[in-house]
Image (cartoon, coloured by chain):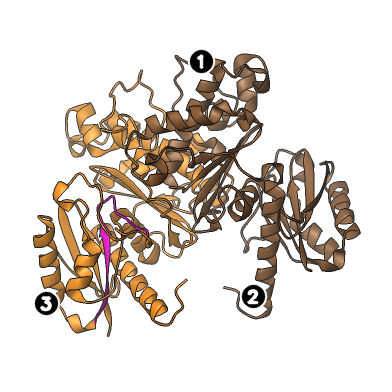
Chain colours: A brown, B orange
Amino acid sequence: MDVFGGIEAGGTKFVCGIGTGPGDLETTQFPTTSPQATIDRAVAWFQAQDRARLQAVGIGSFGPVDLHPDSPTFGYITSTPKLIWQNYNITGAIRDALGVPVMMDTDVNAAALGEARWGASEGLSDSLYLTVGTGIGGGAIVHGRVLHGMLHPEMGHIRIPHDLSQDPYPGCCPFHGDCLEGLACGPAMEARWGVKARELDPDHRAWALEAHYLALALATWVCTLSPRRILLGGGVMQQPQLFDLIRKDLAQLLNGYILTPEVTDGLDQFVVPPHLGWRAGVLGALVLAEQACASEVAVLSGKNS
Amino acid sequence: MDVFGGIEAGGTKFVCGIGTGPGDLETTQFPTTSPQATIDRAVAWFQAQDRARLQAVGIGSFGPVDLHPDSPTFGYITSTPKLIWQNYNITGAIRDALGVPVMMDTDVNAAALGEARWGASEGLSDSLYLTVGTGIGGGAIVHGRVLHGMLHPEMGHIRIPHDLSQDPYPGCCPFHGDCLEGLACGPAMEARWGVKARELDPDHRAWALEAHYLALALATWVCTLSPRRILLGGGVMQQPQLFDLIRKDLAQLLNGYILTPEVTDGLDQFVVPPHLGWRAGVLGALVLAEQACASEVAVLSGKNS
């Protein structure tokens, strides 16, 4: 049976997987070091698997990345703050080493895609996947496809109302101060409250404030992307009490304006945790590998458009 | 030659057009009254044209509207505050009277589509059209298609930072108070400054504040939808000084974080006025009519998917 390869290329670790889906996925993971050493290790692992069956590889990468097929740096990691990875052709490196088609997207877009194929947004044409951890990132599925646009979303950096009288913390984003990420990522919680987020009591008022910031962002995305479901993952979202706080706040913010069953029937099925856990990214990368194969076939048969 | 019909169904007036594009479009317009009388008038006008050549009709309508093909109220105007138009099957009324395929979308989505076909966003796969007037509405083109999702965007209702110490005006949105529309629509400007927006001097500080609110929203959309161009239309945007104020503020808000040529080469080609003026909506409706024809052919040949 043919199989696909997936790589979740994270800033601190790589997750590699091979298979056709959640049922047969085999994975490995190791720390991210230099580009050469890290890619060599990934390639060696894929080669040690049943490489003859490997049809293509997908990569969900930390970014920013260049996703424009007509760009000379298509498939590169570009202006990342991780200097040794700047302007690195990760797609080309994997393609040259393994001799198979390769397709890349951002890590969070890959996770959104994995969840839309096999997870909490399975079968939905339009969904949003948000990860809230060291940073905040979002991937949108629109009409069944990952939204890219000019670059790719940088959803952590949207502006939200910040009531300085209630929360004098100025935000930690080096570019924007109190954008969403600056106010609501894990490091912002730690800087505001003086302890790591996971050490805060579940009843601490930190969680209501965190839920409020996330609900403000969700209200903006409901009015902009109109997703059929919103998935919230990442380290900060491991606090289960956050979900109900966010749903309650979001309902108050929308205030009866959006009259769809998803919203008016309660938000329990609208704002949910992902289903695929840590495997969402690498499973999404498998979907990218499938797409790489389909593109290759289209090119070979002259059907690329 | 075959022609298409377009209707921009507005809350105060209807614009009807017939043709194949900007070069041969013939139009008429009349006030919106009751559904029956208004539709009768539109139908009579189309019938008085060379009706034998009319292949299909597209409608860009005030909303909210039901755009889900699998819904029993598909093609209806739904919970509009204009009570006599509530739950009105505008699509069915036109289809039954003219005997041609009909496709509907929101008025602002139709305008976004018209501009993407023949206007300021011509040929771009991803763009945003915003209208700022009595209300604020936005239509997004993603991968060449209009974004719909769960409902359709309600972009005027996103939340933005509101510095009450600089601007104590509480906002005029009956649902959300100081959402974008509540702070930045034409009536909000009139309520805040005591005179109609168009009577404010071009140097009045009202315009810098207006530009700031719109730039905050644009920054959020750049980070969410990543459009390749943003078109700003509507009555409030008739003030040409607003464009440079918005561009300057948006550049400061993004603060070097989004490194694409569209953004870093100055924003003169990124934030622009629409090209089609008042005809954007009715021309977009022609594109919807084309799509209605294509769907019909697909259904008849079993290729609908």
**Inter-mark Cα distance, 2 to 3:** 47 Å
From the viewer's side, name the closer residue of B63 and A67.
Answer: B63
Query: What is the chain identity of the residue bearing mark 1?
Result: A
Identify the image quadrant of residue B1.
Answer: bottom left
Residue on which the image places disc 3? B48
Task: Classify mark 1: helix, strand or loop.
Answer: loop
Residue type (three-letter) at the residue carrying disc 3: Ala
Q: Position of residue B132 (x, y in %)?
A: 29, 44
Query: What is the chain identity of the residue bearing mark 2?
Result: A
Query: What is the chain identity of the residue bearing mark 3?
Result: B
* Residue A222 on the magenta span: no
Q: Callout 2 environment at 10 Å: few (<14), some (14 to 19), or many (20+)? A: few
Left or right: where A91 falls relative to B169 = right
Residue on which the image places disc 2? A298
* Residue B55 on the magenta span: yes
Task: Classify mark 2: helix, strand or loop.
Answer: helix
- Can I make out residue A122 in this image? yes
Residue on which the image places disc 1? A168
Q: Is residue B169 above or below residue B229?
A: above
Magenta segment: B54-68
Q: Which one is earlier in the sequence, the residue at label 1 or at label 2?
A: 1
